[in-house]
Image: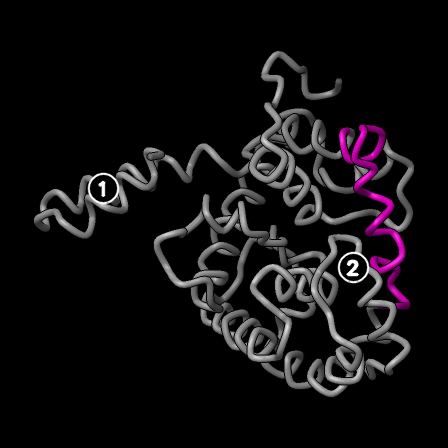
Amino acid sequence: MSGRHKWSDLKRRAAPEHRLRVEIKKAELRATLPPRTYAQIRWAAMECESGPHGYNRYFRNVYQPDFRTSLIHGCSESDAKRLLRFLNRWKSPTWAKLDVVLSDTLPEVLRHLGPLVKLDLDEEKIDLSVFTGTERAFDTLTSLQYIGPTTASRILAVLNPGFFVMWDSRIQKEYFHWEQRNGHAYQEFIKEMRKSALSVVEDSRKYGIDDPAGSISEDICQRPPFTLAKFINDYVWLTVTRREQYPYFLNPQE
């Protein structure tokens, strides 16, 4: 049994003072998982660009500004089909009419998101009340047949790649695994990723880099540039989903 499962069992059985210690342990555990430094996200970006996964090629088609604009302002069935092709890169379960359902549902999802559609994860000031839109949009998507938590997070990451981070089953187990995998838990996950983004920005300034995502995008010849949320996703995916170890001996520019 893993340490995380032991803590979960202890939480159910323990007295309140013991539960507090359990929560502290969990907080310490979470603090080790998302990237905190510029070097970490740069390593992940390089691995996803030229490593064995070739992960970046999945994103280039759907991260084009014209496609995102089309999704937000209309979402035709052809747009929905293009979105499905992206989802199917990970063998997301679909059914024949999912493109039609998505084209009908995404306008409602966008209404829930409101200002989140235009925000970046690393913006200095964000009204925390807007995070509730994440919960509503996520739950709207997962109410559809064949769209689970992982697929819902991927759709949100296409609607706003600057704010949303993907949340697959292994990442769900690492972050808030003791809660239901619903919009509230995903909202809390995004708040954790925001802390990560702010930490990376602060660290990158030590090296005279004000735009870490732009700098890394130049290094990998990516146009239009990927977002900081995308590079954070890369790091979490590699270290949690793929179980790869970050080489701590790396210098920030290597």
Q: Residue 48: which quarter of the image? A: top right
The segment highlighted magenta reads: 47-67
Q: How many marks?
A: 2
Tag 1 residue: 22
Pointer 1 local density, CA inside 10 Å: few below 14, some 14–19, many at least 20: many
Q: In x, y percent, where is residue 223?
A: 91, 47
Q: Please tell me which residue is depicted at 84% across the width and 60% down the height of the picture.
A: 62
In-image side of 216 versus 143 (left or right): right
**Residue 110 lies in the magenta stretch:** no
Q: Which mark is residue 84?
A: none
Give the camera-side residue of 120 and 50. Answer: 50
Give the camera-side residue of 204 and 193. Answer: 193
In-image side of 1 versus 133 (left or right): left
Amino acid carrying label 2: it is: Asn
Q: Please tell me which residue is depicted at 74% across the width and 75% down the height of the picture.
A: 95
Q: Which of the image's four quarters has the N terminus?
A: top left
Give the camera-side residue of 197 and 31. Answer: 31
Q: In x, y percent, where is residue 100?
A: 79, 84
Tag 2 residue: 88
